[in-house]
Amino acid sequence: GAVVSQHPSRVICKSGTSVKIECRSLDFQATTMFWYRQFPKQSLMLMATSNEGSKATYEQGVEKDKFLINHASLTLSTLTVTSAHPEDSSFYICSASEVGTGPNYGYTFGSGTRLTVV
Amino acid sequence: KQEVTQIPAALSVPEGENLVLNCSFTDSAIYNLQWFRQDPGKGLTSLLLIQSSQREQTSGRLNASLDKSSGRSTLYIAASQPGDSATYLCAVKQAGTALIFGKGTTLSVSS
């Protein structure tokens, strides 16, 4: 089945530094990848939709200059948290759907990244 | 705007019990509904995907039903086991959107 690999699984960084999270589709090509953020005991909140070869679409309230998304190939999307602060500490998860599949197909999720900013 | 609600938020049952998790959504114009399992600190594992034209899907001890017109879905877990302990999330897919999630039901099965 479809597999999405997300790295790193856990990262601790100092306030003010930047962190890059990678999301790869291992055995399929994904035109679109999605980035979610999850707070403790809360639902997954969509941050942005990442489209291969074009600019990402950000949800209302998400700072595009803070959360930089790059989708340079059909198998890789990256999320960079720039100038991270403690309030950016959260669980970030990506998901992808396979090229050529319609809206009736399901999504595959990565294993998530726990970001802690100290 | 679509809203997805899951009840109960938490559930504790003894091993062997059959149980039902509930999911409701406000806008019935969906392509499909997907149930996921999430273990603490982990990503999401897809359990069942029900298309809007379907009424139910089964996988092993899991059975998911969908009543699109009333905006409801249930996940039935038969003969629960301690290994079933996790958070269960439902999500709906609509035209032009990513998945919209509920807050989940945290299940604890005691041995």
Image (tube, coloured by chain):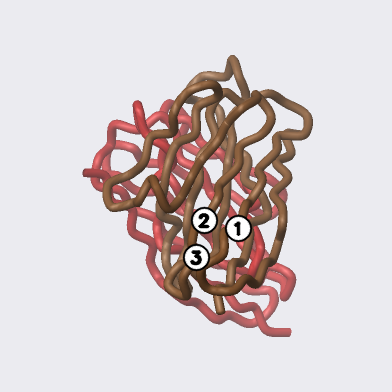
Chain colours: A brown, B red
Residue A14 makes an appearance in the image: yes
- Residue type at mark 2 is Val
In the rendered structure, the residue with mark 2 lies on which chain?
A
Q: Of callouts 2 and 1, which one flags the residue occurring earlier in the amino acid sequence?
A: 1
Which quadrant holds the N terminus of chain B? top left
- Position of B54 with respect to B96 (left or right) is right
Q: Amino acid at mark 1?
A: Val
Residue indicated by mark 2: A81
Residue that carries the numbered disc 3 in the rendered image: A84
Q: Return the residue found at the far left.
A: B1
Which of these two is toward me, A39 or A12?
A12
The residue positioned 55% from the left and 64% from the top of the image is: A91
Q: Tag 3, which secondary structure?
A: loop
At numbered mark 1, what does the secondary structure look like: helix, strand or loop?
A: strand
Horizontal and vertical percent position of residue B45? 65, 51
Taking the spot 56% from the left edge, 66% from the top edge, the residue there is B87
Classify residue A48 by image quadrant: top left
Quadrant the C terminus of chain B occupies: bottom right
Residue that mark 1 sits on: A19
- Quadrant of residue A27 within the rendered picture: top right
What's the residue at 45%, 36% (across, down)?
A: A49
Marks 2 and 1 in Cβ contact (< 8 Å): yes
Camera-nearest residue between A87 and B94? A87
Residues at marks 2 and 3 touching, judged by CB atoms closer than 8 Å: yes
Q: CA distance from mark 2 to mark 1?
A: 5 Å
Chain of the residue under the numbered disc 1 shown in the image: A
